[in-house]
Image (spheres, grey):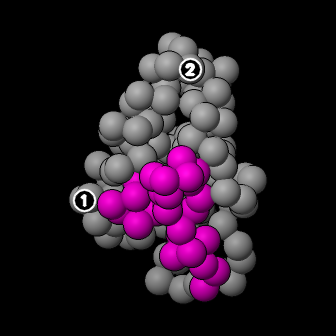
Amino acid sequence: MAEMRDDRQSSGTTAPPCNPTTTFGDAVGMFGLGVLLRLPTELHETLAAESRREVLAYLYGLDREVPVTEMADYLAAAGIEPDRRRARTILNHAHLPELDDSGLIRWNREDETIRLSVASTAQN
C-alpha cells in the first residue's frame, strides 16, 4: 500500500503538473484524502466536466492569456469536443461562465480572452 502524505502539513513544493491520467489513488497520494474531502462542493461540481479541467490544464501549462478561439481549437483537436464550433459555443455558454464565476479563471468577454486568475496560480 502506498504511503500517504500528512495533508495537514505543507510540503513546500509547487503543484505537480496536470496529468489527465491521474487516478484517484494518485490524487490521494499527492494531496491527502483529508484535503480532497474538504474541497467545497461547488469546486467538485465545477471540476466534474472534463472540458473545464482541460481548460484549466491548458491555461496552467501556458501561463498566459489565451483567445477563446485558441481554446476551442484545442478542445476540438484533443477530441474533447466534436468540433471547433461546438467547442466555442459550449465554452461561451457553459464552461467559461462557470470557471469565471468560481474564480478559477478571468474571462474578458470584450476581448474574448481567458487566463488563470491570480488566486488560482498563487503559491503558498
Residue at the (49%, 26%) spot, across then down: 87
Q: Which residues are magenta?
A: 99-124
The image position of residue 28, as x and y in percent, is: 50, 57
Residue at the (44%, 36%) spot, across then down: 91
Residue 40 appears in view: yes
Residue 116: in magenta span: yes
Mark sitting on residue 84: 2
Residue at the limit of the structure toward the left, as seen here? 41
The image position of residue 14, as x and y in percent, is: 70, 73
Residue 40: in magenta span: no
Q: Is residue 88 above or below residue 85?
A: below
Residue at the (57%, 62%) spot, across then down: 116
Label 2 vs label 1: CA separation? Answer: 30 Å
- Which amino acid is tagged 1? Thr
The residue at which mark 1 appears reads as 41
Mark sitting on residue 116: none
Dot 1 falls on a residue whose secondary structure is helix
Residue at the (50%, 44%) spot, across then down: 53
- Which amino acid is tagged 2? Arg
Q: Is residue 31 above or below residue 93?
A: below
How many numbered callouts? 2
Residue 38 shown left or right of residue 56 in the figure:
left
In the depicted view, which residue is nearer to us: 56 or 108? 108
Q: Name the front one of labels 2 and 1.
A: 2
Residue at the limit of the structure toward the right, as seen here? 62
Quadrant showing the C terminus: bottom right
Pointer 2 and pointer 1: residues touching (CB < 8 Å)?
no
Residue 18 shown left or right of residue 102 in the figure:
right
Residue 1 appears in view: no
Instruction: Pick whichever of labels 2 and 1 is earlier in the sequence.
Output: 1
Label 1 crowd (10 A; few <14 / some 14-19 / many >=20):
few
The image position of residue 112, as x and y in percent, is: 54, 47
